Image (cartoon, rainbow, N blue to C red):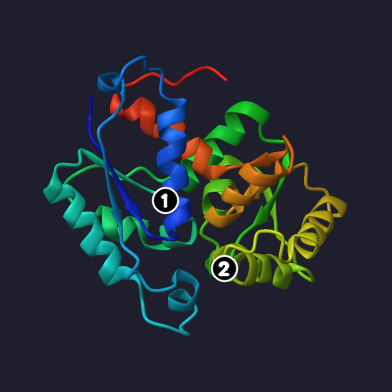
Amino acid sequence: MKTIGIIGGMGPLASADLYRKIVLKTEADLDQEHIHIIIDSNTDIPDRTQGIIGAGVSPLEELMKSAKRLEKAGADFLIMCCNTAHYYHETIAGEVGIPFLNMLEETVKHIEARYGRDVVVGLLATDGSIRTGIFDEYFRQAGIKLIKPVKNQKYVMDYVYDGLKKNKFEEGKDKFLEAVRELRENGAQLFILGCTELSTANDMFGFGEEFIDPVDVLAKKAIEFAGARVKRD
């Protein structure tokens, strides 16, 4: 099987969650049937949203360090569970000699295959992901309508930064759900948890079947790409 390299540390709990999902979703009876995984939990990577909007240091240099470290350590391909950091995906992929799976692209493929093109999708993500439109092109190519919160986007950011990143998992959750209600009222039928911390919160609270977790999608794709089998749900 191929060795997986995880560019991690964004945040550390989210990286651990991706690793955990890969292990739990791999069809294996013995340790030796699991996938070899190398994790670089690089907590020196600057905040992605701040870097993208020009309010902080660009994370690209540290992201590149992690990618090259993992390649040198023996990873056969790379994955990364930070949605916002995928703004730099193409640049990183062009600087390494191994494949780099794209979580956002795989998420859109999953939605198209399972729900078709007529579904309306609401995006719950950081300001960095919203402003750069990193999800938009993939949905546009698939012909699927994507909408975003407007009046309640602040509550998504507050929940991620003042709640989840500080391990205060209930802090701001009710306000966050107001952003979900806004999207639902505007026609959304599915909701992308477009920030990795939201994926972790979903594991704790179980927001519902209509919430799509890109980390879950990526974990299953990585298992298949590594040459292992995905355990049936």
Residue at 25% from the left image edge and 40% from the top image edge: 77
Quick check: 121 above or below 233?
A: below
Q: Tell me, yes or no, if residue 186 can be seen here.
A: yes
Q: Position of residue 106 (x, y in %)?
A: 47, 39
Quick check: 174 above or below 71?
A: below
Q: Position of residue 166 (x, y in %)?
A: 57, 68
Residue on which the image places disc 1: 15
Residue at 29% from the left image edge and 29% from the top image edge: 35
* Viewer-nearest of discs 1 and 2: 2
Disc on the earlier residue, 1 or 2:
1
Label placed on residue 88 = none
Q: Residue furthest top?
A: 29
- Most foreground residue, 115 or 9: 9
Quadrant of the frame with the N terminus: top left
Is the residue marked by circle 2 packed among few (<14), some (14-19), or many (20+) residues within 10 Å? few
Calculate the distance from the C-alpha at mark 1 to the C-alpha at mark 2: 15 Å
- Most foreground residue, 54 or 39: 39
62 left or right, relative to 224: left
Residue at 30% from the left image edge and 45% from the top image edge: 100
Residue on which the image places disc 2: 166
9 left or right, relative to 195: left
Q: Residue furthest bottom?
A: 55
207 left or right, relative to 231: right
Identify which amino acid the numbered label 2 is placed on: Lys
Q: Residue furthest right?
A: 185
Residue at 47% from the left image edge and 45% from the top image edge: 17
Q: For residue 181, which quarter of the picture?
A: bottom right
Tell me the SS state at disc 1: helix
Identify which amino acid the numbered label 1 is placed on: Ser
- Most foreground residue, 105 or 19: 19
Quick check: 57 above or below 142?
A: below
Q: Tell me, yes or no, if residue 195 can be seen here.
A: no
